[in-house]
Amino acid sequence: MKQQAKEEYPIAGVLLVTNTKNGKVYIEAMNNIKRLNGLLFQLKFGTLLNKDLINDWNSFGEESFTFEVLESFKTEGKSTYQVKSELSQAKEKWLTEKQPYGELGYN
């Protein structure tokens, strides 16, 4: 099982966090979307740099938020630079489409 975990490559992607109470959204690019627990940890313990999102997380509660993968891609055979570049482009595309700014979001 340990060997299998070592052989698996991360799946990078763009994640959409939605506040179901007020409709605001947050878009985040992640090198490994399987590590959603890291983002949840930051929200639960208030260490995420986005203070507006932290405040709403604390006010509305975890059950008021949903998580959705907007886009994902394999990282196998790609350099760190390639993955970062693809992630940046994908995030920018979704930021343009969703416009999660001001009253609409947390970005």
Image (tube, helix red, strand yellow):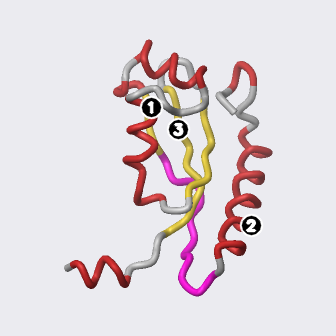
Residue 28's label in the rendered image is none
The image quadrant that residue 3 belongs to is bottom left
Q: In this view, does 105 lie to the left or right of 102?
A: left
**Residue at the spot 47% in from the left edge and 71% down from the top edge:** 10
Farthest-out residue, front? 47
> How many other residues sit within 10 Å of disc 1, few (<14), some (14-19) or many (≥20)?
many
Seen from the viewer's position, the closer of residues 81 and 36 is: 81
Q: Of the numbered discs in the image, which one, if any, rests on residue 85? A: 2
Q: Which of marks 2 and 3 is nearer the N terminus?
A: 3
Q: Quadrant of the N terminus?
A: bottom left
Callouts 2 and 3 close, C-beta under 8 Å: no
**Span highlighted in magenta in the image:** 68-78
Q: Is mark 2 on a helix, strand or loop?
A: helix
Q: Which residue is drawn at 48% across and 26% down?
A: 20
Residue position marked by numbered label 3 in the rendering: 17
Image quadrant occupied by the C terminus: top right
